[in-house]
Amino acid sequence: MKLPSFRLRLALLSAALAGSTLVGFGAVSWFQIYNAKISRLDAELLNHLMRATPNFPPREEPPVGAASPRRELSKESSRERWQFYEDSLSYAFGTNTKTPVALLVLDTNNNILYQSNSLPADLEVNRLLLARLELAPLAPSPKREPPPLPSNANPSFERPPLIRPRPPQFITKQTATAVWRVGAAKFPNAQIAIAVSLQAVDQEMATIRNIFLVSIPGALLLVAVGAWLVSGGALRPIHQLTGVIQQVTVKGLDQRIPIGTTDVEFVELIQVFNLMLSRLERSFTQASRFSGDAAHELKTPLTILQGELERTLQQVDPGSEVQQRLSNLLDEVRRLSGIMRKLLLLSLADAGKMSLYLVEVDMSELLMEMLEDVEMLAPQLTVQTDFADGLHVKGDRDLLIQVLQNLFSNAIKYNLPNGWIQIRAHQTPTTLHVTIINASKDIPVSECDRIFDRFYRGDPSRNRKIEGIGLGLSLAREIARAHRGDLTLDSTSSGQTAFTLTLPMKLDN
């Protein structure tokens, strides 16, 4: 199973970790800010509850024996005072806009002295205020010093502990239209409850939430891009190693990766790879030198043997058994000489020393010569041509003839009885394409990748009666590549085989 890009996974993992951290930090920060705002609102509510006491009329005790005078404020003036107090509360909670506030004031007998009537949901809010007043404790009284002990008091006398009422508690309640923060306190001469809408707080928190929703994805994008760039820098030695591996061919075994600018973590890997290249280069040099030296050493004895056989063949009686045996030996010697020439060319190609004698080559003329050979060697085959005159390329004429001979030889040897051969050629401004197609049995898919391997001849049951050792196609492709071209096996329909020779129109030395 092929995994996705390691660099991409690293960037996504970094973004996921950073995203989790940012989301957690944002959530905690949002709740901390919200709690801080609520705490500040509670402190202001407590302060305003404590400041509400001056709005109550003082209670005066009549002197002993005198009539009990009672000063009462008119209901109208008391309501105006509380209305003014409520209006001041609307702008007293840290916002620049008017904050909806509900106020409820009761006397000690639970009679309503004042209640807000300007809210859309006054009844529901007033019920909240009444319910909160029922549970509200007495408001904390100012701190007072305990009275001094009498001078004749017993020193062991202990003052009774001062019982201070609990401070009012604040709760959050939701109605059909808004969310309210409710606080209530009871005083000796009255009871008061205040409800402040959390609309302004919710708007501020919504703004902060929107900032988080915009900034966190942006931060994640920056983290992902940064992780992508950092991982790219960390993986640069791997890319460098991959680039060198891609250049490792028979002509590039001398490639080495410098270690001076490499991270410490990759030094050992690169050292092992450089040592492997050294061993490969040494082994290939020895193998290439052996094949070249063997071809050179065998070339001279085979030439001498061929000459002696030809001279002896001329001296024996025509038609005799000795002449027949000598003719068979001469054919085998010529076959060995051809093999030696191919091995020598392959060793030169492997070493990158195949020399080309570049001339202007008329490929149309060469193809016509090949057609004459086909008509002479395989007259039973039908030949079809599709190429124009004057197809010229720059190349080595002898080597290109050898390529065409190998292709036509295979087209004849592997053809079907009474089969056919098609020859197509066309050129573009930069490239010449020559395609040779012949009727044949289907090549198994497993053999398509190995058909250019040296000494590989496929399934013996298909070609055990066909001469050859499996060097023709390998040598033909090496010659094509020496011309900066290529030789490929084309995908065709069933019952045919096609090879395409590609050559550049101009070849730089």
Image: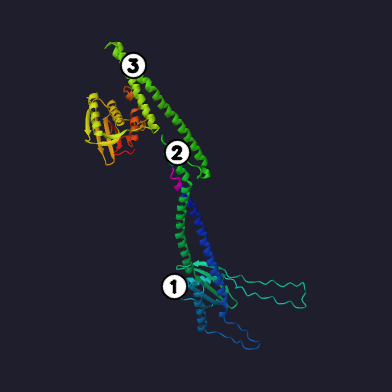
**Residue beneath label 3, please?**
308
Residue in the picture at 57% in, 76% down: 51
Residue in the picture at 29% in, 12% down: 315
- Report the amino acid beneath label 3: Glu
To which quarter of the image does residue 403 belong?
top left
Tell me the SS state at disc 2.
loop
Which region of the structure is painted magenta? 3-8
- Tell whether label 3 touches label 1 (CB within 8 Å): no
Q: Earlier in the sequence, mark 1 or mark 2?
A: 1
Between 433 and 121, the residue placed more toward the observer is: 433
**Residue 178 vertical placement versus 265 (above, below):** below
- Report the amino acid beneath label 1: Pro
**Residue beneath label 2, please?**
255
Residue in the picture at 77% in, 73% down: 155
Mark-to-mark CA distance, 3 and 2:
48 Å
* Place of residue 196 in the rendered image (x, y in percent of width and height, measured from the top left): 50, 71
- Report the amino acid beneath label 2: Gln
**Residue beneath label 1, please?**
120
Q: How is the image coloured?
A: rainbow
Mark-to-mark CA distance, 1 and 3:
126 Å
- Tell whether label 2 touches label 1 (CB within 8 Å): no
Tell me the SS state at disc 3.
helix
